[in-house]
Image (cartoon, grey):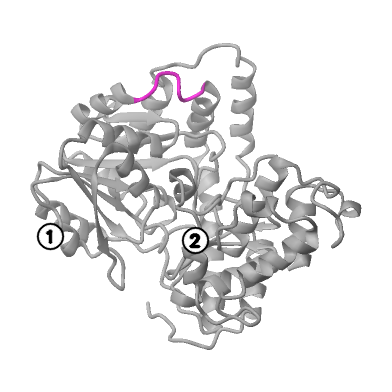
């Protein structure tokens, strides 16, 4: 554990390697309050357990910290001396705050330090924006002294043309999650409920709680969304159904025929949000946009953060009936989407041919990684996103620990499984090497 601790301090926290030794005190190693907080987040992410900065503050030397981590992970399945029980760690851990739940136990929270060696937990694209998009960003940045267009007029017009819709059917926000928050806010009411499949995007529950909704989780079927069960869960109190398609974290997707049956079964008084954050990686990327004009209660949410590679600029959009769009736009904070983000998004739409070439590369890597994992004996369901899902159940934490020791960050869902983003070929090979070291007994190989 000391070697892992040293790696995190040197690579993630940029501590001078000469300062890192087992007998060094926290202060001598440069672990002030902020650095200790960063270390606790990095450890939580890499090991899949919750480690707080308060716990680390009570330890004197780096050897003490390493010993604490060793004890903290001793009960993880597959750890030295482990009993296979994870309950103790979860019982000790404080209740996750909303932000931590949304980001997955500290995932992505690395202020002041670079990401782990192989960051495969965030579903980012490994490619930087195309040259034409970077040029648009540079030109827009030269006018950063000016306020952005509050109407996002150029971007809304470009999106309307792109999808063959009128601009009054398009709402733009600082990431699709802010648009979901606005929608939940305008539809909330006493006793209101929101239904969604599970496991799915963690943010749904966080946003629903903030808006005062009662949440109804419907377990996924073996091959993806159980649309019949989801439709049956809708009652007179259900204001919204949130359908992540392809699903995050499993990568499974419902086809047009299934969605049409589902939409026909849901009362028109209930809004259905088709969250297509990963649609570009799917077999039918234009599905939602084709359906939205025919179903007044259907809302399609999309983002420029994934396939378009603009995660750092925060821009997303919704397609819906003009009446719904009007209500959502009134709830969005004015000037929340910068001119830089707007210019980058417009340029990305113009560069779609180049970007979709990158998507095809990612899909090919996804299939290569999936095939290699299946050869090792892992069950890996088919995916239509830029990640794969490993339904590991009780073996989840042990697998996360193995990956962390190899410098690979993956996204754990305790007692359920692990989501692994498809990165560069080098990053994917590092993950496959870590998975091969895990020593998993061959299990049932999933079928297509």
Marks 2 and 1, the one that precedes in the sequence: 1
Residue drawn at (24%, 26%), measured in percent from left and top? 327
Q: Nearer the viewer, residue 366 or 414?
A: 414
* Range shown magenta: 332-338
Residue drawn at (29%, 36%), measured in percent from left and top? 319
Above or below, comparing residue 148 to residue 262 in the picture: above
Q: Nearer the viewer, residue 211 or 127?
A: 211
Q: Which of 153 and 218 is in front in this view?
A: 218
Above or below, comparing residue 79 to residue 256 in the picture: below
Q: What is the x, y in percent for residue 401?
A: 61, 70
Viewport quadrant of the N terminus: bottom right
The label shown at residue 47 is none
Q: Is mark 2 on a helix, strand or loop?
A: strand
The single residue placed furthest to the top in the displayed view is 146
Which residue does the numbered mark 1 point to in the structure image?
Answer: 232
**Pointer 2 and pointer 1: residues touching (CB < 8 Å)?**
no
Q: In which quarter of the image is residue 4?
A: bottom right
Residue drawn at (37%, 51%), measured in percent from left and top? 285
Q: What element carries label 1?
A: helix
Q: Classify mark 1: residues with Cα within 10 Å, few (<14), some (14-19) or many (20+).
A: few
Q: What is the x, y in percent for residue 306?
A: 49, 47
Nearest-to-viewer mark from 2 and 1: 1
6 lies left or right of 416: right
Q: Is residue 335 magenta?
A: yes
179 lies left or right of 339: left
Q: Can residue 62 be seen in this view?
A: yes
The label shown at residue 387 is 2
230 lies left or right of 40: left
Q: What is the x, y in percent for residue 57?
A: 69, 50
Q: Is residue 280 magenta?
A: no
Q: What is the x, y in percent for residue 42?
A: 64, 54
Marks 2 and 1, how far apart at CA: 30 Å
């Amino acid at each position: 554990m000391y070697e892992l601790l040293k790696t995190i301090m040197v690579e993630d926290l940029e501590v001078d390697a000469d300062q890192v030794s087992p007998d060094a005190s926290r202060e001598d190693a440069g672990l002030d309050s902020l650095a200790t907080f960063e270390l606790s987040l990095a450890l939580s992410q890499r090991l899949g357990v919750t480690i707080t900065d308060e716990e680390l503050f009570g330890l004197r030397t780096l050897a003490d910290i390493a010993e604490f981590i060793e004890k903290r992970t001793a009960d993880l399945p597959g750890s030295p001396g482990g009993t296979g029980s994870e309950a103790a760690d979860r019982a000790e851990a404080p209740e996750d705050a909303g932000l931590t739940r949304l980001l997955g136990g500290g995932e992505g929270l690395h202020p002041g330090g670079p990401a782990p060696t192989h960051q495969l937990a965030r579903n980012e694209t490994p490619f930087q924006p195309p040259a034409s998009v970077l040029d648009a960003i540079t030109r827009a940045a030269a006018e950063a002294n000016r306020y952005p267009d509050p109407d996002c007029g150029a971007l809304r017009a470009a999106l309307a043309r792109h999808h063959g819709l009128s601009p009054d059917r398009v709402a733009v926000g600082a990431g699709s999650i802010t648009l979901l928050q606005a929608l939940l806010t305008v539809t909330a009411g006493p006793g209101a409920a929101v239904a969604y499949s599970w496991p799915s995007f963690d943010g749904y529950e966080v946003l629903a709680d903030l808006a005062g909704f009662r949440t109804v989780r419907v377990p996924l079927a073996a091959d993806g969304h159980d649309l019949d069960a989801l439709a049956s869960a809708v009652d007179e109190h259900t204001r919204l159904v949130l359908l992540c398609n392809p699903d995050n974290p499993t990568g499974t997707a419902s086809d047009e025929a299934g969605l049409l049956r589902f939409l026909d079964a849901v009362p028109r008084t209930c809004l259905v949000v088709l969250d297509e954050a990963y649609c570009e990686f799917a077999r039918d990327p234009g599905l939602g946009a084709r359906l939205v004009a025919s179903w007044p209660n259907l809302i399609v949410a999309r983002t420029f953060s994934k396939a378009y590679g603009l995660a750092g600029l925060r821009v997303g959009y919704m397609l819906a009936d003009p009446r719904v769009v009007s209500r959502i736009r009134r709830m969005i904070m004015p000037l929340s989407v910068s001119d830089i983000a707007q210019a980058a998004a417009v340029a990305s739409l113009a560069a779609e041919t180049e970007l979709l070439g990158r998507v095809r590369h990612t899909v090919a890597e996804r299939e290569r990684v999936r095939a290699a994992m299946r050869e090792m004996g892992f069950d890996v369901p088919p995916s239509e996103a830029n990640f794969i899902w490993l339904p590991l159940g009780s073996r989840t934490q042990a697998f996360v620990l193995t990956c962390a020791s190899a410098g690979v960050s993956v996204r754990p869902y305790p007692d359920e499984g692990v989501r692994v983003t498809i990165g560069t070929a080098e990053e994917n090979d590092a993950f496959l090497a870590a998975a091969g070291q895990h020593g998993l007994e061959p299990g049932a190989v999933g079928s297509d």
